Image (tube, rainbow, N blue to C red):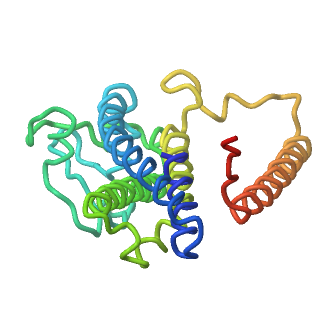
């Protein structure tokens, strides 16, 4: 998805600028078909992964959907805000849908957060928000891909400038979805570093002090920021230069 939307971003840039149009249309065709297929496969992969999490890390799934009631059918929330003190979600949800996605039964009892010890529950609203942002980005990419396939079918890929402007920044969507998914995975597993076996507070190194940790974070962050700056510089330069015409002789 990252590669596909990266191609779409470049194609959209050329189409908006009205340069390298034929090349851009070919890029668009390949990328939009690819992203449409892969984004739907990603949806299936995410569904399978959620079923796995329900089995092996139930507290993480319960936090992702703010499901508190122990062994009751679970609501799938489209969006919302969690009041952790009152154990309520202020948002829009589909009753029983999470149960259905896990088991195929709308009344299937899902283990809720109240079934766990208080010191074994992750920060619920934080996980809830990161998870739903990830899902929202995934659904957005599916919608963009399918609409793009429709435009390709109708031969109108350059007829909607607003759509091309969205595609222009779409390269960042897979990156953000990946990061929010990673946050969900790591924060949702807390307080465990190895789920059910070792807590994070027990996994620190006694010979490593805070200063060393801070230094390594600053060092690695600086290196990756430098690499990012070089990457952006090279990519922008290549995109502006446009495709290289091959010598057919």
Nearest to the observer: residue 243 or residue 66: 243
Q: Is residue 56 above or below residue 102?
A: above
In the image, taking residue 25 as reference, residue 104 lies left or right, namely: left
Nearest to the observer: residue 96 or residue 116: 96
Residue 220 horizontal/vertical position (percent): 84, 45
Q: Is residue 241 above or below residue 27?
A: below
Extreme-front residue of the structure: 249
In the image, taking residue 226 as reference, residue 36 lies left or right, namely: left
Residue 23 horizontal/vertical position (percent): 54, 57
**What residue is rendered at 21% in x and 45% in y?**
98
**What residue is rendered at 54% in x and 67% in y?**
169
Q: Is residue 153 above or below residue 102?
A: below
Residue 48 visible here = yes
Nearest to the observer: residue 41 or residue 48: 41
Residue 21 horizontal/vertical position (percent): 52, 66
Residue 171 horizontal/vertical position (percent): 55, 58
Residue 61 visible here = no
């Amino acid at each position: 998805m990252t590669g596909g939307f990266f191609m779409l971003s470049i194609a959209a840039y050329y189409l908006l600028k009205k340069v390298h149009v034929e090349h851009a249309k070919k890029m668009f065709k390949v990328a939009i078909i690819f992203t449409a297929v892969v984004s739907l496969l990603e949806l299936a992969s995410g569904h399978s992964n959620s079923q796995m999490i329900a089995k092996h890390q139930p507290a993480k799934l319960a936090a992702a959907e703010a499901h508190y009631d122990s062994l009751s059918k679970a609501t799938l929330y489209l969006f919302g805000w969690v009041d952790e003190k009152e154990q309520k979600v202020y948002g829009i949800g589909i009753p029983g849908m999470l149960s259905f996605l896990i088991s195929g039964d709308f009344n299937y009892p899902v283990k809720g957060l109240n079934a766990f010890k208080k010191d074994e529950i992750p920060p619920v609203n934080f996980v809830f928000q990161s998870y739903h942002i990830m899902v929202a980005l995934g659904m957005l990419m599916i919608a963009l891909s399918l609409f793009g396939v429709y435009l390709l079918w109708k031969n109108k890929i350059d007829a909607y400038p607003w759509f091309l402007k969205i595609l222009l920044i779409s390269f960042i969507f897979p990156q953000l979805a990946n990061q929010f998914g990673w946050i969900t995975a790591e924060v949702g597993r807390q307080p465990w570093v190895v789920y059910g076996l070792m807590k994070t507070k027990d996994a620190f190194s006694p010979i490593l002090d805070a200063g060393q940790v801070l230094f390594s974070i600053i060092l690695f962050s600086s290196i990756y920021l430098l690499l990012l700056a070089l990457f952006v510089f090279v990519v922008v330069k290549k995109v502006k230069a446009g495709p290289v015409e091959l010598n057919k002789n």
